[in-house]
Image (cartoon, grey):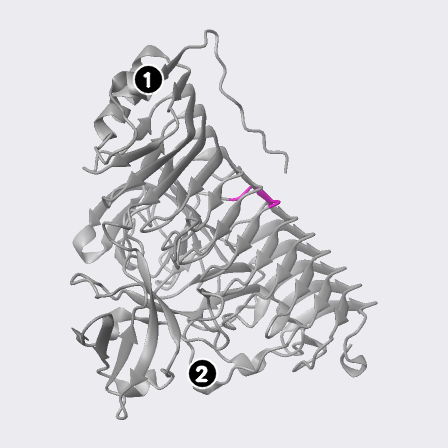
Amino acid sequence: MDIEITSPSWKEYKKVSVTEFGARAGGKRCNGAAFQRAIEYCKSEGISELTVPKGVYYFRDGNHPTFDGLSDFRFDGGDSEFIFSTLKAFVDIRNCERVEFRHFAVDWDWEVKQLASIGLVRGVAEDGTSFDLVFPEYDTVPEEFPLRTFNPMNPATLTPGCELGHEFNGIHLGKASAMGGNVLRVELPRPESYRFLKQDQAYIVRHYVYDTNAIELHGNAHLTLSNVTIYSAPGHAFISTGDQHHWKLERCRIVKRPGTTRCITATADGCHISNSQGYFIIDSCDFSYNGDDCLNIHDNSVQGFRRIDAKTIRLSRVQRWRNPFGPGDSVEFRHADLSPAGIAANVAAVSWDEGREQCVLEFASELPAELNDRSILFNRRYDSGHYVVRHNFFHQNRARGILLHAGEGLVENNRFYRNQGSAIQIECGAEERWAEGFGVRNLVIRDNWIESSDVNHWNMAVIYMGVYLDQGRTDYPIFQDIRIENNTIVNCPQQAIYVSSCERVFLRNNALVNPNAGPLKTAQDGDENCVANREYYRGSLMASHCNDVYIENNRRLSIIPTMESHIYIEPNTSRSVTLRDNIGFAEEDR
């Protein structure tokens, strides 16, 4: 994993300041036009570095900085803050080569609109048809106050997630009526679905989710962002797509602004990488309080098609941004169980009907007549793999610490704390909601410290490896050549490690302290954000639908009472599993 990021190279070093083009700190004037004039001047004149004198700069009219087509360039924010209030990417960096961006912070203007609020259940009607929410941050609830999602939070620590917590979507709720002051009464059209609501439950109520991103990276090569802080954004914090390759985040932070009562930073992922060319490094960063995953690495697939003729098919439930098919792309067809169909074809033409979320793909050659219309399509133009993720702190966020759908990776020496879902989730699948990942190969997860994660019992394991498919688990090893070694896992409610649909996996020298320390989640707790058939998940370590797995030299230590204490190998789906020299597990199950 020797990924080299090339720095800017200058024959003649030339520097300018944004103040030369009219930018001014202080006050609340919009600096968008001035910043853009400075950027365009740097591009046309081959300027080496654009600097910003330290201060607070506002961007109010939607004219946000766009860096497009620069090379051998550095932007130094001088430890300034940039404040935004329009639903447009805060900073857009695209088609640049050998560039650096450093020393600045970005934030959403919460005085204009809050991104999320703390909501406390004050009472539930006896017949279950409504509940009252009090919002302690307000004297009076604002008139425009969308209730997008309700995510459980711990009222003592004000962190996302709580034991056996339920989250739900505001789209299914009824009318919300002001009851005076900071109280809303929310009607429940289907009371039977909300029996979990109880007095004094706390929720992060998101008003924005995937609305716009803080820093967007498209098609850059040899890009470095260092010492960049994102206090909040109404969407992802960092996003990387397209022909983006060889780039790095170092010493970047996604953290709550000090001196505030905010309950969220970015309302979606901390760093979202999809349909890209991979080769990146994330080093010594701090990602926290995100509304979704801290780090999500994936490429998008599609399942199901309708054949039009021998060369042409129609895809449904697709979007151009999520499934960017283009002429010349190589598409591999997989069976519904993710196994290879032995068929690949190049796209000749694409036409979109975005309103119906459909597109038509015409291929350069005929497709075999026996091709199954439930096949899964991998667009092999993209591969977001080849990465190093080290020395980071992923903590106190709503979903997973790291979600891995791509391989050729090294994840080492990171710390995970109070992630609501799994600390590390290795995944691939296709279903009605999502279709992501082409499988994971050649991955090393080592020397990580994982504490108090899987808060909501999302996936039954702190390190979780599995697929999601309409038919359930697959015997095809979509995950291959993976080493999970020398990790410490402390205080997890259910399993520490679960692996499945895999081949040549090594679980070695891991320390498990107080695994299976929470109450068993049962059917009455609901299936939201939980795997189905949770009764199948047994033990502290488990393997199923696997071949050639080695579980060696792992140590389990329980200081408090725990639910289970053994290693469980599912007998009907597992082949060639080696158990050797594991300590502290129930003797009869080793």
Q: CA distance from mark 1 to mark 2?
A: 57 Å
| The image quarter in which residue 388 lies | top right
Query: Where 454 sits versus 326, above or below?
Result: below
Tally of numbered discs: 2
Amino acid at the residue labelled 2 = Asp
Residues rendered magenta in the picture: 385-391
**Along the horizontal axis of the image, is 472 left or right of 502?**
left
**Along the horizontal axis of the image, is 343 left or right of 307?**
right
Residue 43's mark?
1
User: Quick one: 405 or 14, which is closer to the camera?
Assistant: 14
Q: Quadrant of the C terminus?
A: bottom right
Work out whether mark 1 precedes mark 2 in sequence or the reverse, and give the earlier one.
1
Q: Position of residue 547 (x, y in %)?
A: 67, 65
User: Quick one: 256 or 370, which is closer to the camera?
Assistant: 256
Residue at the disc numbered 2:
525
User: Quick one: 590 or 261, which is closer to the camera?
Assistant: 261
SS class of the residue under badge 1?
Answer: helix
